[in-house]
Image: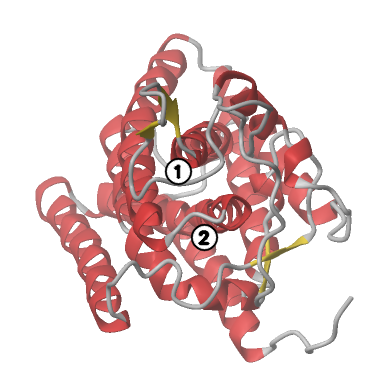
């Protein structure tokens, strides 16, 4: 997803190379048009913290995870074991998929050189926008499935295709973000001045005219990126449960923890090299499960939860236990 520019007094800022820093490998799900698997430079240390301490971010993350656990326990108490298992399976799945959102945030902030305070604003609007968009997509998906059962097969094929692309695409293609489809789309309709103006989306020029800042452009790219993510994110949870309430709440709890997760694990994202293959296998499993359901063979929710949690945990654990050797490609 991502970027803008042009000439004149309101010219969009020229493409700026990201600063040299630790590398972050971006997931293939991030791409929307451009085939960009290159290692992307991470922002300088502390850029995403925006004044918050690591301890505060860790506490916030734990609170969101604890909130999800309590919510799942509430579902268990009110609706029973199966709906609770569906919620936890959906939550774990969405939390793993949401790591791709973090890759996008890092890419966007690095590419536009978004200052720390402005990052907080972009994250806030990005999360709110994602919550609203996911609600729309969940309602639309539920309505489609209610009227046309065969749509489940379409959802399954989307997931299987996403899984295939994640597992097979190369990681060394040298594509610039300025060639990305979402960047071009946003740059076509959003003209910006070259400089940021604090945390403002618009600034006043010397002649009194109003102009957009790069923060508006960066936020727009993040919002549109979530539309791309929803293409396989929402069908994936519908592969676990057909209950729109559980689909949406599992999405929301994963989304609401993104800000804390972004600050907390930004430096560790480069080390999660086995998480993407694990997510790819999860998407393939959910797609196959949906096709099996259409064929009359049902995989129970407890098994689905065990498979999803096991694969995601294995991917994260293997990444930490088997770090990549420190050599430059």
State the count of labels. Answer: 2
Residue 86 relative to residue 235: left or right: left
Find numbered disc 2 in the image and state the secondary structure of the residue it sits on.
helix
Which residue is nearer to you in this view: 98 or 74?
98
Residue 107 relative to residue 258: left or right: right
In the rendering, at what x and y percent does residue 223 appear? Answer: 46, 35
- Eyeballing the image, is 164 above or below 57? above
Q: Quadrant of the N terminus?
A: top right
- Eyeballing the image, is 134 above or below 288? above
In the rendering, at what x and y percent does residue 286 appear? Answer: 58, 46
Task: Check the image and name the residue furthest to the front.
Answer: 207
Q: Quadrant of the C terminus?
A: bottom right
Residue 147's image quarter?
Answer: top left
- Eyeballing the image, is 64 above or below 89? below
Whether tag 2 and tag 1 are in contact, CB under 8 A, the answer is yes
Find numbered disc 1 in the image and state the secondary structure of the residue it sits on.
loop
In the rendering, at what x and y percent does residue 232 appear? Answer: 57, 37
In the rendering, at what x and y percent does residue 228 appear? Answer: 58, 34
Which residue is nearer to you in this view: 90 or 137?
137
Residue 28 relative to residue 223: left or right: right
Which residue is labeled 2 in the image?
Answer: 308
Can residue 274 be seen in this snapshot? yes
Residue 153's image quarter?
Answer: top right
According to the image, what is the colour scheme of the structure?
secondary structure
Residue 296 relative to residue 50: left or right: right
Residue count near mark 2 (Cα–Cα under 10 Å), binned few <14, some 14–19, many ≥20: many
Which residue is labeled 1 in the image?
Answer: 240
Q: CA distance from mark 2 to mark 1?
A: 10 Å
Residue drawn 45% across the image and 30% down it: 212
Task: Decide which of tag 2 and tag 1 comes sooner along the chain.
Answer: 1
């Amino acid at each position: 997803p991502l970027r803008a520019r042009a000439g004149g007094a309101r010219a969009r800022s020229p493409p700026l190379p990201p600063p040299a820093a630790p590398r972050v490998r971006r997931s293939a799900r991030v791409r929307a048009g451009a085939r960009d698997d290159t290692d992307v430079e991470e922002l300088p240390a502390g850029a995403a913290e925006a004044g918050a301490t690591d301890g505060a971010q860790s506490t916030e993350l734990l609170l969101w995870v604890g909130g999800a656990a309590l919510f799942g326990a509430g579902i268990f108490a009110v609706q029973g074991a199966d709906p609770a298992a569906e919620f936890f399976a959906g939550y774990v799945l969405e939390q793993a998929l949401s790591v791709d959102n973090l890759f996008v945030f890092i890419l966007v902030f690095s590419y536009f050189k978004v200052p720390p305070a402005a990052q907080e604003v972009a994250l806030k609007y990005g999360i709110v926008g994602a919550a609203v968009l996911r609600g729309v997509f969940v309602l639309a998906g539920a309505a489609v499935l209610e009227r046309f059962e065969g749509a489940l097969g379409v959802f399954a094929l989307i997931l299987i295709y996403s899984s295939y692309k994640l597992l097979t695409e190369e990681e060394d293609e040298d594509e610039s973000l300025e060639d990305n489809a979402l960047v071009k789309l946003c740059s076509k309709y959003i003209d910006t001045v070259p400089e940021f103006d604090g945390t403002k989306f618009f600034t006043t020029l010397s002649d009194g005219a109003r102009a957009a800042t790069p923060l508006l452009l960066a936020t727009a790219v993040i919002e549109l990126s979530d539309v791309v993510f929803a293409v396989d994110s929402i069908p994936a949870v519908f592969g676990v449960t057909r209950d729109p309430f559980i689909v949406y709440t599992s999405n929301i709890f994963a989304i609401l923890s993104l800000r804390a997760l972004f600050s907390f694990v930004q430096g560790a994202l480069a080390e999660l090299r086995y998480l993407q293959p694990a997510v790819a296998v999860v998407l393939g499993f959910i797609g196959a499960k949906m096709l099996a359901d259409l064929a009359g063979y049902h995989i129970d929710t407890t098994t689905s939860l065990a498979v999803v949690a096991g694969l995601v945990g294995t991917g994260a654990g293997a990444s930490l236990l088997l770090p990549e050797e420190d050599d430059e490609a």
